[in-house]
Amino acid sequence: MTIGFTPHHVSEALAGACFAADYRSARARFLAAAACAGARVDVFVDDGACAPGGGSLTTDVAVAGPADATAALLVVSGTHGPEGFVGSAAQVALLDALAAGVAMPRVRIVLVHAINPYGFAHLTRTTENNVDLNRNFIDWSAGAPANPAYAEVHAALCPSVWTPEALAAADAARLAWVERNGHDAFVDMTSRGQYSHPDGLHYGGRGPEWSNRTLEAIVRRHLSAVERIALIDWHTALGERGEPFFLCFNEPGGPGWERACNWWGRERVETRGGFGGAARPRYTGLLFHGVQRYAAQADLTGAVIEFGTVSNDDARRALQADRYLRFGDGAATDALRAALREQVLEVFAPQSLAWKRSTLGHAIAIQHAALAGLATWR
Ligand SMILES: [Zn+2]
């Protein structure tokens, strides 16, 4: 039995220093912290998209630690846009620890800030092409996997009219599908990714997104010589509010899985929660799979680590609102649009100080547990 980690104590001041209010200030904090830490910085400009109100969008990378290290910690934020606020805060905290001279094992540290800068800046979960980036890392040469059941519920999942009547009708159609096919099938079909409906939920795209190609460039540039990689991809929404929820994508029971259990605690890694009791979806095209492919020479142990925010039903409504704001009937008033955007933000980046302190405390401890694990991984 492993007990995993103890959350770091995070003061109000530390939370305020690490959490930013928008993409632009998050980026500024990250770059300032990287400079203080003496990290090397790479900047990748997303030439296919603009910031709100104009201006460029970038994925920024901070690299620290010895160049000849054989092990690396790779930490990614912003795969799902506004879910990146807590990931950004965790990265800033790690850079601040480096700047403060906290002892680190002899590993390379690669921090990828805002891998989906469009989503982060526009407070939307998907990329500029409505792609769920965490379904985009399939092997495109093999073609996209089929998910024919998605077509049956696309309309119910994606209401294009935002009235109480329309939402109730969509919910009824969804529940009827669940009644016929079961909860496990519903969670699997909706979550694992679909490649047929560009205006739908969990759309995996038509080819590698800019963010995908950028991650490939980052991994090949900074991780092509290492033998062992620990990956943390920070997310939000699933799990108990303010608590971490682990989705380890190593094979259950295999050496990578066992390593994750040793680093972070078996009972955390092997929990079945987070999907309302359903089995875990058969995800395709995860960022984890991308890193596996782009650093094929290395052993990879890694996880999506979520921080819980709201119930699964409320999170689904926020996904629908996010999608409605982009593809809906256009009838929404400015006030409704602002309210829906606020709802999306609150589900994926809660403004509560208590939530920020709790999640950052866990995140700091989780990062340090991975670093400690890398130090002894042979
Ligand atoms: Zn996510």
Image (spheres, rainbow, N blue to C red):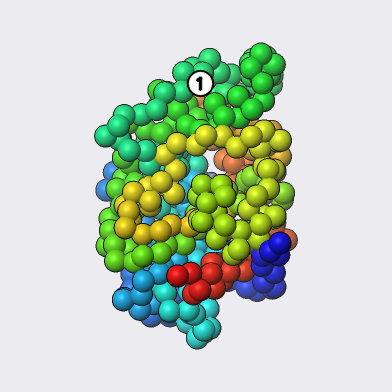
Residue where numbered disc 1 is placed = 150
Front residue of this view, candidates 345 and 152: 152
Rendered residue at 50%/66% (across/down):
91
Horizontal side of 250 relative to 313 (left or right) equals left
On screen, 119 above or below 353?
A: above
Give coordinates of residue 174: x percent, y percent.
64, 19
Horizontal side of 61 relative to 80 (left or right) equals left
Front residue of this view, candidates 4 and 83: 4
- The crowd level at tag 1 (other Cα within 10 Å; few <14, some 14-19, many 20+) is many
Which element is circle 1 on?
A: helix
Which image quadrant is residue 353 in?
Answer: bottom right
Q: Count numbered badges in the picture.
A: 1
Inspect the image, locate mark 1, and give the three-letter code of the amino acid beneath it: Tyr
On screen, 81 above or below 6?
A: above
Give coordinates of residue 241: x percent, y percent.
71, 50
Is residue 29 shown to the viewer in this render? no
Rendered residue at 38%/80% (across/down):
38
On screen, 335 above or below 269?
A: above
Which image quadrant is residue 65 in?
Answer: bottom left
Give coordinates of residue 2: x percent, y percent.
68, 64
The quarter of the picture where the C terminus appears is: bottom left
Horizontal side of 57 relative to 317 (left or right) equals left
On screen, 261 above or below 52?
A: below
